[in-house]
């Protein structure tokens, strides 16, 4: 999955970028500005999308509408998760207290994410991708894999197996009265209360909990492997992180809030999401990111990630095994 060395020109540093690709201080200061007011709007729109998805399904009250709403809850989770990611970097709001309160109670806990624990593990991810403390190593390594192996992973995600595995520890911790787990459960009880207020408490199960254990798990895996699947440990972020051409469809379903400019994010983790395309443009103009380094679509990248061939076992002649 690693790019050809010819696609990795050694052009840094420049007068605008240092040897790691980070902007020089005068440019970096401008790119690091956080737009608090517009981010208030982003949080409100995430909640608005959830309300609109549920409300439209209720208004139409048709089996097709309910099924469609079930799947469209997935992008709602994506938005809460990515805003939580921004809060974990303390880039959602410029004031730390507001960033953390909103990140926990209005974003992270809504999507079953303990922001403080996530921040610790995520910073380990950024400290050294594919290093000894990489928290998501099992998601990234081993690619490309055979198509049937990819299919099994996605089936486990779609049919609640991965969801149950991830939700079970939270339930266990809440049972033991662990404070953060109880806070997350408290937010979920509040959501159940909102569904109860509109007279449909059962929709908390069908249009919130079950999509979290299925649709969201599929989208999360597809996004994660598109970011780092099959890459390697390196100081050169072009060897740790994929870059994919962005489309409106992908940004709706998978990578809102400029998450798809993930190479730029890993080059400088202090740049808020609104300015990642600007940093990416700087990397392109410098010649450090060349056009052929970019995958034309997520589908093209997923196909390559699932292009691995079956391997012949060394101890059983003629018998095939899968990764």
Image (cartoon, rainbow, N blue to C red):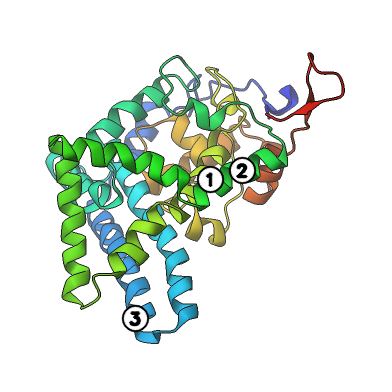
Residue at disc 3, secondary structure: helix
Callout 1–callout 2 Cβ contact below 8 Å: yes
* Quarter of the image with the C terminus in it: top right
- How dense is the environment of label 1, judged by Cα within 10 Å: few (below 14), some, or many (20 and up)? some
Q: Residue at x 66, y 38 (%)?
A: 149
Q: CA distance from mark 3 to mark 2?
A: 34 Å
In the picture, the disc for residue 152 is 2
Q: Are marks 1 and 3 in contact (CB under 8 Å)?
A: no
Q: Which residue is mark 1?
A: 156
* N-terminal label among 1 and 3: 3
Q: Categorize mark 3 by other alpha carbons within 10 Å: few (<14), some (14-19), many (20+).
A: some
- Residue lying at 40% horizontally and 63% vertically, measured from the top left: 73
Percent of width and height locating residue 163:
41, 46
In the image, residue 27 lies at what x, y percent? Answer: 39, 34
- The residue under label 3 is 58
* Residue 32 in which image quadrant: top left
């Amino acid at each position: 999955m690693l790019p050809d060395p010819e696609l990795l020109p050694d052009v840094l540093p420049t007068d605008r970028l240092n040897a790691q690709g980070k902007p020089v201080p005068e440019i970096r200061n401008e790119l690091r500005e956080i737009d608090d007011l517009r981010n208030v709007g982003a949080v409100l729109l995430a909640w608005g999308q959830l309300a609109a998805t549920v409300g439209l399904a209720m208004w139409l009250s048709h089996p097709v509408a309910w099924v469609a709403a079930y799947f469209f809850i997935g992008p709602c989770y994506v938005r809460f998760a990515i805003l939580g990611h921004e809060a974990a970097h303390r880039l959602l709001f410029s004031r730390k207290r507001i960033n953390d309160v909103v990140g926990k109670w209005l974003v992270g806990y809504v999507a079953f994410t303990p922001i403080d624990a996530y921040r610790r593990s995520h910073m380990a991810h950024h400290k050294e991708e594919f290093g000894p403390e990489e928290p998501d190593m099992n998601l990234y390594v081993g690619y490309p894999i055979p198509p049937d192996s990819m299919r099994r992973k996605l089936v486990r995600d779609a049919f609640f197996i991965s969801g149950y595995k991830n939700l079970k520890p939270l339930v266990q911790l809440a049972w033991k009265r662990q404070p953060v787990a109880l806070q997350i459960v408290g937010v979920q009880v509040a959501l159940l209360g909102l569904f109860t207020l509109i007279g449909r408490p059962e929709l908390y199960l069908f249009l919130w909990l079950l999509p979290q254990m299925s649709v969201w798990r599929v989208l999360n895996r597809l996004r994660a492997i598109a970011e780092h699947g099959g890459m390697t440990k390196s100081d050169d972020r072009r060897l740790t992180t994929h870059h994919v051409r962005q489309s409106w469809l992908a940004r709706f379903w998978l990578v809102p809030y400029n998450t798809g400019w993930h190479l730029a994010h890993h080059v400088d983790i202090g740049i808020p999401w609104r300015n990642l395309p600007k940093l990416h443009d700087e990397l392109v103009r410098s010649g450090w990111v060349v056009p052929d380094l970019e995958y034309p679509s997520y589908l093209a990248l997923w196909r390559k990630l699932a292009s691995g061939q079956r391997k012949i076992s060394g101890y059983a002649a003629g018998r095939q095994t899968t990764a």
